[in-house]
Image: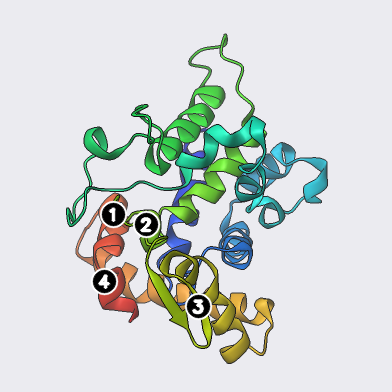
Amino acid sequence: MGWHEVLWIGRILVLMQLVHGVVGWGKDGHYAVCKIAEAYLTEDALVTVKELLPDSAGGELASVCSWADDIKWYYKWHWTSPLHYVDTPDFKCNYQYCRDCHDSAGHKDSCVTGAIFNYTKQHFSAYQGYDPQLKYNLTEALMFLAHFVGDVHQPLHVGFTGDLGGNTITVRWYHRKTNLHHVWDTMIIDSAVKTFYGSDLAIMIQTIQRNITMIISSLGCLLWRRGLPKVGFVLLLFSTEYLLLK
């Protein structure tokens, strides 16, 4: 698999975030993102992904997309906790990598965007043979990347330092007292699956896939007719996410 296949995997994971409804990133949210992404992989990319997956995955990327959440509680993996989010100074509604991408101890590059860059670079380097001396664990890199691309699109994984990304903001979700971060992480999608999809995650995934096809076909054709490059297409999808999908 060359660099274009690696880029395609990342692009599909990004596009999954642009669909209204998959906004809470508990296990179901991460599973849905990766399950849909698998259907869009090229044949070569899918073969490579399956080769990289651990035996426990059963050949399914979606089954390990919550792995990064599962391991962060173990001592060996505590260092990965800051990689799930990036916070900005309070009421600074902009993001600056040099200012914001660090952990609580000030270690640079320890944030979700730093992690995405790092694990993407590992795959690029490995497949292009840039440095044969580097021994990357590409299985872990793939599982981290699939997870963190989801995390970075959860609004409160890119929040304010003062409230710890909404973790210190107490709210009520229907009759349950919780915090705002947990509502976005898990409870929105849990409620949506129960209320709109008969508690069937598979039906929700199918609905999202239909919406993705509709969005890409309608907006994509318009932009391509105007000669907008593919990179510009993806960037414009980011900037118009809420306008298009609310």
Secondary structure of the residue carrying tag 3 is strand
C-beta proximity under 8 Å, tags 1 and 2: yes
From the image, tell me which residue sits under label 1. 160
Say whether disc 2 or disc 3 marks the residue closer to the N-terminus: 2
Three-letter code, disc 2: Gly
C-beta proximity under 8 Å, tags 3 and 1: no
Residue 238: image quadrant is bottom left
Left or right side of 228 for 134: right
Three-letter code, disc 3: Lys
Secondary structure of the residue carrying tag 4 is helix
Q: Given this view, does label 4 or label 3 mark the residue nearer the observer? A: 3
From the image, tell me which residue sits under label 2. 165
Q: CA distance from mark 3 to mark 1?
A: 21 Å
Which mark is drawn over residue 222?
A: 4
Q: Given this view, does label 3 or label 1 mark the residue nearer the observer? A: 3
Examine the rendered structure and indicate whether residue 207 appears above or below residue 13: below
